[in-house]
Structure formats: C-alpha cells, structure tokens
Amino acid sequence: MVKHIILWKLKEEYNTEDVKKGIKEGLEGLFGKIEGLTEIKVQTDCLESSNAHVMLYSVFENEQALKNYAVHPEHVKVADTKVRPFTESRSCIDYKEEK
C-alpha cells in the first residue's frame, strides 16, 4: 500500500470556503474512477496553528497505481481546474506502508 499526502497553501485571494469546497469535491470525486485508488480524503477545516490550508490524504494499491493516478485524465482535469490555479505552494510525501 502506498500513501500519498499533499499539503497546499492557497493564494491569499483564494483562501475561501468556495475554493476549498471545489478542491474537496473535485478530488474526492475521483474515488471509483481511477484503478488502484483505494481511499481519498481532503481536509479543509484546519486549526489556526496550521500553516497549510488544504490536505489530501490518499491510498493506492501500489506505486504503479500512484504513477497512473498522476497522469490519469480525470485527475489531471481536477488538478488543472480546481487545484493548481488557486495554490501558492505544495508539499508532498509518498511512502510505502505494509499492511
């Protein structure tokens, strides 16, 4: 199992509930559309102590499934329309976890 976690900081003018809702709905809407994606959750309700605005937590069957997700047309569409235009920075960590 491979875990893929991303933290985004939004551009100041886009740090709104509507933008966050669009990111959450877009990414979570990928569930069931991409083979090997077994879990996906977006967190937008962060505590004041956070230095990021949005978190993606996703789980894949294996490393190849993560690679396929990265270039899958449905994912690319969401990333290009609901995420990238609004983000200032992105941090990512991917790791393998044995069951």
Image (cartoon, rainbow, N blue to C red):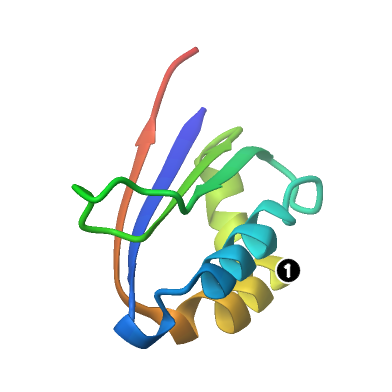
Residue at figure coordinates x 47%, y 80% from the top left = 84
Q: Is residue 79 left or right of residue 44?
A: right
| Residue 57, placed above or below residue 23 | above
10 Å crowding of disc 1: few (<14), some (14-19), many (20+): some
Residue at figure coordinates x 19%, y 47% from the top left = 49
| Residue 61, placed above or below residue 58 | above
Quadrant for residue 61, please give it.
Answer: top right
Nearer-the-camera pick, 91 or 12: 12
Residue at figure coordinates x 54%, y 74% from the top left = 19
Residue type of the residue flagged with mark 1:
Glu
**Residue 86 in the image: x percent, y percent?**
44, 82
Residue at the extreme right: 32
Q: Is residue 62 left or right of residue 86?
A: right
Residue at figure coordinates x 58%, y 38% from the top left = 60
Q: Is residue 50 left or right of residue 67?
A: left
| Residue 54, placed above or below residue 64 | below
Q: Which residue is mark 1?
A: 74
Nearer-the-camera pick, 33 or 43: 43
**Residue 70 in the image: x percent, y percent?**
55, 63
**Residue 85 in the image: x percent, y percent?**
47, 86
Nearer-the-camera pick, 35 or 6: 6
Label 1 secondary element? helix
Residue at the extreme top: 99
**Residue 22 in the image: x percent, y percent?**
63, 69
